[in-house]
Image: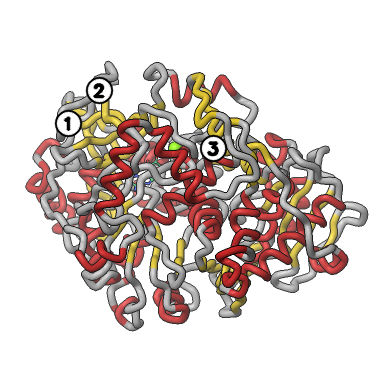
Amino acid sequence: MADIESLLREKRVFKPDPAFAKQANWGPKKLAELRRLAARSPERFWERMAKEYVSWFRPWKKALDWKPPFAKWFVGAQTNVSYNCIDRHLEGEHAWRRNKAAIIWEGEPGDSRVLTFADLHREVCKFANVLLAQGVKKGDRVAIYMPMIPEIAIAMLACTRIGAPHTVVFGGFSADALRDRIVDLGAKLVVTADGGWRRGKIVELKDAVDEAVAGTKGVERVIVVRRTGEPVPMKAGRDLWWHDVMAQAPATRPAAKLDAEHPLFVLYTSGSTGKPKGILHTTGGYLTHVAATTHAIFDLKESDTFWCTADVGWVTGHSYVLYGPLANGATTVMYEGAPNHPGLDRFWAIIEKYRVSVLYTAPTAIRTFIRWGDEHPNRHDLSSLRLLGTVGEPINPEAWMWYHRVIGKKRCPIVDTWWQTETGGVLVSPLPGAVATKPGSCTLPFPGVEPRVVNVAGEPTKPGQGGFLTLQKPWPGMLRGIWGDAARYREQYWSRYPKVYFTGDGAQCDEDGYFWVMGRVDDVMNVSGHRIGTMEVESALVSHPGVAEAAVVGRPDEITGTAIVAFVTPKSGTHANATLRETLRSHVSREIGALARPAEVRFTDALPKTRSGKIMRRLLRDVASGKETVQDTTTLEDLSVLARLRGQEEA
Ligand code: ATP
Ligand code: MG
């Protein structure tokens, strides 16, 4: 392992708009004060967040108990996530929120439902009672395998209400993937649906559950929501309809007083770099972290309509579709289906329909929209938008600029938020009223968080020099472990640098202290003795007007050690030919240096991605070097993409 070089130099800076700063939840003054507090003592800062953003049944005795690599936050305190997300909006000074929309839901076929906080309270209490009646006790695990319908939120919140840790398995996963997770966790009950809508077709979830559960012993009950109305087999003695059990359930159920460290959920990572890991999060610290970051970073006001487009099956969906916004008493939008159904403008139609004011999406989606063309967003009234966010991958500066120009109409600040399933919530991000942005940089750490780019020896790198992104101090939303595998937990995150968390990402920190994530350390390419990250070469490619998306990987080469192979998706209307291929190679050379010039450019209409939309470079490496893939492909979104890429290689 050697250090990483950084080649990209992005000079554009966008200062916060004074008008935005003035109304911001965390303006420059507040941020400066909180940074001072956090610099004196991160624990004191997080205690302040815990008091400000979370209601507790019992206070903590100690903010942090840190026995590396194991942290406990708010030791001795008691709280409940569903209480914080629902009940406290029905009483006291916020009682008026009772009839405020908590969830605005849009189904793919165009049906729509709104649940107020009072509605949510009733449904969550009922389902909590159902779970208890079906024998689910505090500490028992519940697997949730559902489409993006309001019942998924109800099921998750009901689990938190009684202290039954949930694991949400993304509805696009196969029966095998579901079974692995059910078995790993020893789940007792599964919540699912007869199906869900995706691109006009029914995703058959119940069949997958039957197949997954057939080979296991622990699952006693399967509860099925009727969504599509298609007939599904129901196994007597095991399967129950949601509407039947809900009809009999009492509508009240006090929230259990849970220890701050009570397990809240286990969620498996996206699997971009390898086999997914079962990440464990607990109650009080996680809630503090997501509630505070939601309020500060998304600047949510009572009047906002917040849409985080992530599936609830991913951590972004947990933290910023549900728990963060609801803990703040905000209105959150959920959409069931695909962005291209029935047309390529569905997202923009939804924004116009509900007057969405804060939009949070992923670079993969943004690059797809760029490829589809500006006419789709341009057909809609996007004037309700006031703030934009991104998460999931490094955003290429030109994609950032497109988001700024075409969606934000140059009015909306952009928050590029860096975090991981493991971190629970955002750790590095601009605060929209207080931090100037630079396209492609996630900017500065949230107060109380101490990221550091270090070299192989663990020493801080100089400004502009690439290295390994680490977190020097524990934070409340951090994972508490990998479910049932303490050894893997230590090995994966804590073995490279003692007592320091290693993120697995490469990054550089510039003269202003801004962080630039350069991609996964596993994806770094070693060209003629220079170690180059993927993001910078890809950004150089995406900065060409004909390119929508690019992924680069290394292929073994006799002369240079590694040759760069670029997989490029052109924008619609671009002629992908030999001339463009040559143009792109010289373009990269000119933008960031001859060193990074791809040896080969291959055009493709799609890249292999995880189901959460991240490019899987580990699979492209096999394609580039003509090897068979023996790696885990269960998280791949579309297997045929790999086959197509291979076919092209032979042609
Ligand atoms: P696995 O760990 O199984 O490979 P994964 O890392 O893709 O899966 P996630 O936890 O969903 O699973 O993704 C976190 C990763 O996403 C980060 O480590 C980082 O590489 C990338 N990422 C997220 N947000 C950003 C961002 N704003 N800028 C750059 N990279 C980001
Ligand atoms: Mg990861």
Quick check: 93 left or right of 292?
A: right
Amino acid type, residue under disc 3 in the picture: Pro
Q: Is residue 229 above or below residue 500?
A: below
Amino acid type, mark 1: Gln
Q: What residue did someone put label 3 on?
A: 276
Q: Would you say the residues marked 1 and 3 are in contact, meaning their CB atoms lie under 8 Å apart?
A: no
* Coloring basis for residues: secondary structure
3D distance between C-alphas at marks 1 and 2: 9 Å
User: Is 574 situated above or below 180?
Assistant: below
Residue drawn at (74%, 57%) of the image: 207
Measured as percent of width and height from the top left, residue 312 is found at 56, 56
Label 3 beta carbon within 8 A of ligand 1? yes
Helix, strand or loop at disc 3? loop
Residue type at tag 2: Asn
* Secondary structure found at label 1: loop
Residue located 69% across and 64% down the image: 121
The residue indicated by pointer 2 is 455
State which tag comes first along the sequence, 1 or 2. 2
Density class for disc 2 (Cα within 10 Å; few <14, some 14-19, many ≥20) is some
Circle 3 crowding by C-alpha within 10 Å: few under 14, some 14–19, many from 20:
some
Estimate the x, y position of residue 451 in percent, counting from the top left: 32, 33
Residue at label 1? 465
Contact, CB < 8 Å: mark 1 with mark 2?
yes
Q: Earlier in the sequence, mark 1 or mark 3?
A: 3
Find residue 29 and report its horizontal and vertical position in percent: 25, 52
